[in-house]
């Protein structure tokens, strides 16, 4: 019984830490636990979580995708340009942007799965290409304009009182969760992440899957890029950069919980919530916003140290 | 002349999850002696020497080295004068011998000239000849081993342990190695050598210890024991009991391979009938693994004709082989077949998840559990703990998981590569018992590659012998003989065993 309890503690310690944070912040700052503020926290982490859900799929199959940081900004610029400068109807503009994102993922997948470049290096290259392209087409300037109502609704609207970015996040998280945990594809992806050679020898189409994961993570990054523009009402070429670091951080924090050692969607969500709660709570307590990054980074290191010591994370 | 033993091993026990690798072993090793340790796979040889070398902690018992109790740890064993040459190489490929040997011990600015002089001195004394300025990756297997030995000798050991030093060596290299070991012995070093090859024991060793199933059977002077006696000490039960062969070969040909060429192997003809177990014998590196993996579609095939029940079979990828019911149980299953951190259920169903998914791709876990339970009980695995990670299972049970995985969908041909590697003796017999049951009930055929000759002799209907990437001979069951098969595995053309007498070398 006691052993079971310890097992529970060690598997869920990160989740417990999140609950602890929420309790502490609620006690310290009465503002924190208002429903308005909590929704605010969710909205703040929504785009990060969407990106991180894609990264989780990549990581489950043993790969990293650094290019998402640049791609979110680039696809934001693309949709802004299509809507404003080319005057293309919303539905078509969204489709083109998403297809572009998928194509970008295809390129990453090709470089990693077919050419055989380690994903860390390949996507570091395409990260630079994407952020450079965003700066090039905008000459480094933001695109300010009046966007169509239907578009800004994605970023600023509400559905039964819940901000749209949060709704989109919930949908993406549920889809990613089902994919990884409930389908054969998800099982195969984890198999590839655990042992690529064995996965090939049991007959899994590993090249297909290793391309697929990059397409999925690029599409996720594209969604956050689009929603970000809709929320800000402007296209920022350098936007989205923080999603890479915070997204990866969330994934790694998430690897310590629920399914220790493996990237998993619920863990990633926990990680993103920790990141968001700390940022929000510290701000309410009156700390400098600059201290947040230091604390977030430290938390990630501590969480991963704990997991590495249990020999559960291999990176 | 009665010397003091340099190493005293007293009542060593070692428990691994599911296996007791050593059950109270006591041995004395003396300086200036070559002491061979023999025994079957899983007898406990490697565990014993790894404990002496400080890589493995014993569960109980004592090791006394040079009069001091050895408390474990690699650095401590080196300090006490124990050096080990492992079966797998521990060298940095891009560095040369000098750089490898002095790795981590160099001065801030390495002085290769001085280092080379030190090594040259050792080489002159022991007769080692190897190019110490060439990157190790450009050296042959024999030379790499000499570099490892040189590294051990440089530390001025009192004891040198070699774990299966001849496994990857040719006969000439083996001869060179033995000459060096005899020189080491003259220098007063205690040499401990693990080997599978009995003829080598008689050629080089002064004493021999037989381990069986984790226990010491005997330590004998080489002059007071015969090869036949050694074998009977190594083998526990009679062959019949250990290899429960009972399958019925039918006439129809199941698999026919002709003119099969890959970058590594060239096979003129191999035929497998329904119900048959056909053995692939050969030394490590003779091409058995490469052949099986190419047939499975995992390695490149340059040309060849393969027929499965008379229909053409093209080995293009593992998934296409699997579609035709041709399944590989690879060697080194922990690395090539299993997802170690994942559950038994996960590992059993991973190849045929489509059997349990609906049109949306969602897995029906209930259905999955039912079928996993059914296949695992037909390989006699306890199905109570389906959710435990496979890394908690013993070697034999892990192999059952892999075997069970390939029962999910109508198997026709099993390609078994070293299926009993890391499986203890009792579990081995059970594995073959299950295999024969499956062969008879499902009408499959089996290609069995193994380094364990007894296993091949016990289980196979026919044996093909591989040497240097080619099939050199075929034996039918009534032609089986240890000597015949061994000699075609080991000898080039009409040659004979390396039979240098000791007087020749020392004289």
Image (cartoon, coloured by chain):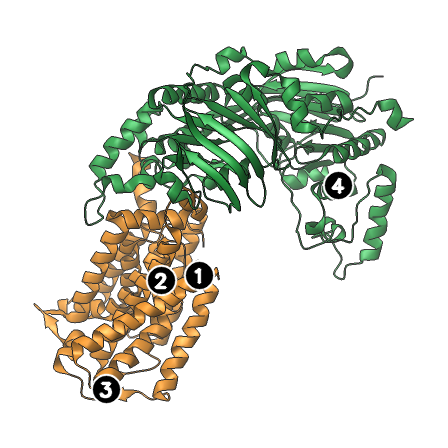
Q: CA distance from mark 1 to mark 4?
A: 39 Å
Which quadrant, please, contains the N terminus of chain B? Answer: top right
Q: Secondary structure at mark 4?
A: helix
For disc 4, the marked residue is B146
Q: For the residue carrying disc 4, how many other residues have a C-alpha within 10 Å: few (<14), some (14-19), or many (20+)?
A: many
Q: Residue furthest left?
A: A160
Instruction: Write down the chain letter for disc 1.
Output: A
Q: Residues within 10 Å of mark 1 (few under 14, many from 20)?
A: many
Same subunit: marks 1 and 4: no
Find out whether the residues at labels 2 and 3 contact each other: C-beta distance under 8 Å. Answer: no
Q: Which chain does the green colour mark?
A: B
Q: Residues within 10 Å of mark 2 (few under 14, many from 20)?
A: many
Q: Which residue is mark 2?
A: A214
> Is residue B332 depicted above or below B45 in this figure?
below
Residue A235 seen anywhere in this rendered image of the structure: yes
Label 2 vs 3, first from the N-terminus: 3
Residue carrying label 3: A86
Q: Nearer the viewer, residue B103 or B162?
A: B162
Asked if residue A6 shows in the view, the reply is no
Read off the residue under disc 1: A112
- How far separated are the C-alphas under marks 2 and 3? 29 Å
Image-based side of B221 in relation to A19, left or right: right
Residue B170 position within the rendered picture, expressed as x and y whole percent measured from the top left: 71, 35
Q: CA distance from mark 3 to mark 4?
A: 72 Å
Quarter occupied by the C terminus of chain B: top right
């Amino acid at each position: 019984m006691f052993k079971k309890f310890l097992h529970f503690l060690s598997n869920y310690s990160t989740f417990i830490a999140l609950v602890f944070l929420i309790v502490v912040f609620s006690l310290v700052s009465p503002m924190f636990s208002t429903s308005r503020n909590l929704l605010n926290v969710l909205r703040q982490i929504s785009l990060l979580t969407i990106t991180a859900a894609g990264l989780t799929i990549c990581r489950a199959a043993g790969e990293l995708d650094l290019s998402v940081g640049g791609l979110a900004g680039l696809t934001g610029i693309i949709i802004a340009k299509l809507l404003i400068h080319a005057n293309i109807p919303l539905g078509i503009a969204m489709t083109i942007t998403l297809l572009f994102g998928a194509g970008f993922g295809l390129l990453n997948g090709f470089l990693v799965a077919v050419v055989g470049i380690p994903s860390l290096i390949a996507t570091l290259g395409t990260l630079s290409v994407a952020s450079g392209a965003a700066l090039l087409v905008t000459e480094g300037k933001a695109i300010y304009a009046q966007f169509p109502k239907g578009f800004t609704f994605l970023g600023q609207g509400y559905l039964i009182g819940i901000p749209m970015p949060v709704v989109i996040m919930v949908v993406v998280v549920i889809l990613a969760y089902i994919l990884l945990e409930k389908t054969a594809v998800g099982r195969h992806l984890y198999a590839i992440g655990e042992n690529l050679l064995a996965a090939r020898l049991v007959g899994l189409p590993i090249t297909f899957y290793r391309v697929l994961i990059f397409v999925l993570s690029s599409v996720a990054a594209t969604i956050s890029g689009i929603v970000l523009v809709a929320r800000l009402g402007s296209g920022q070429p350098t936007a989205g950069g923080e999603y890479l670091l915070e997204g990866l951080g969330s994934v790694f924090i998430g690897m310590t919980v629920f399914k220790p050692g493996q990237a998993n969607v619920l863990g990633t969500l926990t990680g993103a919530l920790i990141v968001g709660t700390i940022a929000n709570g510290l701000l309410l307590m009156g700390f400098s916003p600059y201290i947040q990054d230091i604390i977030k980074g430290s938390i990630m290191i501590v969480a991963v140290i704990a997991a590495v010591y249990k020999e559960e994370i291999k990176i | 002349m009665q010397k003091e033993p340099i190493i005293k091993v007293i009542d060593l026990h070692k428990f691994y999850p599911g296996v007791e690798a050593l059950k109270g072993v006591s041995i004395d090793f003396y300086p200036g002696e070559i002491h061979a340790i023999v025994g079957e796979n899983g007898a406990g040889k490697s565990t014993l020497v790894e404990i002496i070398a400080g890589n493995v902690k014993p569960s109980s018992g004592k090791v006394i080295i040079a009069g001091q109790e050895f408390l474990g740890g690699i650095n401590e064993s080196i300090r006490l004068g124990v050096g080990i040459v492992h079966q797998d190489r521990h060298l940095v490929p891009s560095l040369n011998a000098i750089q490898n040997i002095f790795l981590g011990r160099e001065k801030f600015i390495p002085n290769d000239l001085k280092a080379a002089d030190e090594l040259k001195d050792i080489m002159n004394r022991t007769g080692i000849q190897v190019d110490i300025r060439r990157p190790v990756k450009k050296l042959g297997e024999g030379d790499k081993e000499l570099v490892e030995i040189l590294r051990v000798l440089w530390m001025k050991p009192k004891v040198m342990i070699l774990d299966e030093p001849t496994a990857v060596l040719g006969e000439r290299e083996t001869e060179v190695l033995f000459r060096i070991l005899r020189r080491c012995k003259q220098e007063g070093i205690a040499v401990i050598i693990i080997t599978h090859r009995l003829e080598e024991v008689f050629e080089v060793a002064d004493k021999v210890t037989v381990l069986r199933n984790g226990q010491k059977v005997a330590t004998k002077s080489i002059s007071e024991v015969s090869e036949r006696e050694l074998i009977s000490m190594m083998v526990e039960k009679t062959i019949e009991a250990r290899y429960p062969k009972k399958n019925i070969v039918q006439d129809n040909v199941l698999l026919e391979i002709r003119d099969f060429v890959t970058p590594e192997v060239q096979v003129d003809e191999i035929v497998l009938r329904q119900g048959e177990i056909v053995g692939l014998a050969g030394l490590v590196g003779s091409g058995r693994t490469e052949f099986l993996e190419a047939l499975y579609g995992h390695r490149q095939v340059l040309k060849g004709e393969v027929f499965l029940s008379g229909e053409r079979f093209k080995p293009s990828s593992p998934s296409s082989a699997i579609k035709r019911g041709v399944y590989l149980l690879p060697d080194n299953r922990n690395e090539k077949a299993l997802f170690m951190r994942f559950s038994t259920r996960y590992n059993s169903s991973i190849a045929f998840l489509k059997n349990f998914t609906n049109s949306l791709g969602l897995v029906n876990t209930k259905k999955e559990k039912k079928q996993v339970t059914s296949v695992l009980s037909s390989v006699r695995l306890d199905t109570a703990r389906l959710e435990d990670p496979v890394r908690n299972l013993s070697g034999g049970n892990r192999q059952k998981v892999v075997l069970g995985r390939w029962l999910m969908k109508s198997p026709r041909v099993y390609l078994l590569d070293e299926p009993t590697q890391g499986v203890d003796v009792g579990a081995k017999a059970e594995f073959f018992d299950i295999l024969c049951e499956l062969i008879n009930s499902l009408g499959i055929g089996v290609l069995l590659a193994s380094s364990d000759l007894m296993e091949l002799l016990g289980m196979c209907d026919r044996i093909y012998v591989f040497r240097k990437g080619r099939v050199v001979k075929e034996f039918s069951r009534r032609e089986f003989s240890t000597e015949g098969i061994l000699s075609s595995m080991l000898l080039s053309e009409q040659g004979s065993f390396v039979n240098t007498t000791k007087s020749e070398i020392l004289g």
